[in-house]
Amino acid sequence: MTPKKKVSPILFGATLVCFLFPFVTVSCRGQKMASFSGAQLAMGTTVDEPQMFGPSQKKMVDPDGTVAISGTRPSTKDLEELDRLGAKVEGRLSVSVPMGARVVRHNAQSEPSFWGLFGAYNWEIKSPGANPLIVVHLSS
């Protein structure tokens, strides 16, 4: 008769505690935008997504680990104010995806090369109507 292997109660407890710590952090230009624990990714959560124009919006992170990152469009009033100020909207958005994550869909103008090992998903933003989108599934 072969003895059965048991999982150490200490190792199991440590694993559960680590599940509560931050697992994924989303940042923009070095500023932390959101952080998700393993428990939030496993059960789903709602995130306040800051907006360049207007109040923040609530976004759902699916319990299956799928996260959608998208742009927003300014209101007509905001567009008129930008035009009155003579402001131009111009820039570049770059999203790097961690190893093991799968990009479900995107509308980037360029994507990483060499089987996704080098570079990032990039968008050239030339107007307020730009609508960058990337949907990423974080593997568990």
Image (tube, helix red, strand yellow):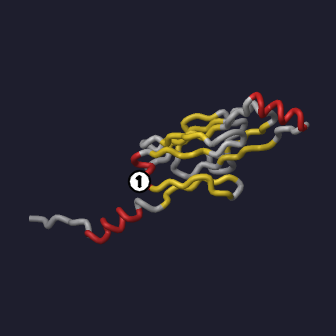
Residue at x 68%, y 35% (from the top left corner): 72
Q: From the viewer's perspective, is residue 130 above or below residue 4?
A: above
Residue at x 65%, y 41% (from the top left corner): 55
Q: Nearer the viewer, residue 72 or 106?
A: 72
Which quadrant of the rendered structure holds the N terminus?
bottom left
Identity of the residue furthest to the left in this view: 1
Query: Based on the displayed image, in which of its 4 quarters is residue 49 positioned?
Result: top right
Q: Nearer the viewer, residue 91 or 60?
A: 60
Identity of the residue furthest to the top in this view: 76
Q: Position of residue 85 (x, y in %)?
A: 89, 38
Q: Position of residue 108 (x, y in %)?
A: 69, 36
Say whether residue 122 is left or right of residue 32: right
Query: Based on the displayed image, in which of its 4 quarters is residue 59 positioned?
Result: top right
Q: From the viewer's perspective, is residue 87 above or below residue 16?
A: above
Label 1 CA crowd tier, 10 Å (few <14, some 14–19, many 20+)? some
Q: Nearer the viewer, residue 111 or 80?
A: 80
Say whether residue 109 is left or right of residue 84: left
Q: Nearer the viewer, residue 1 or 24?
A: 24
Query: Based on the displayed image, in which of its 4 quarters is residue 76 positioned?
Result: top right
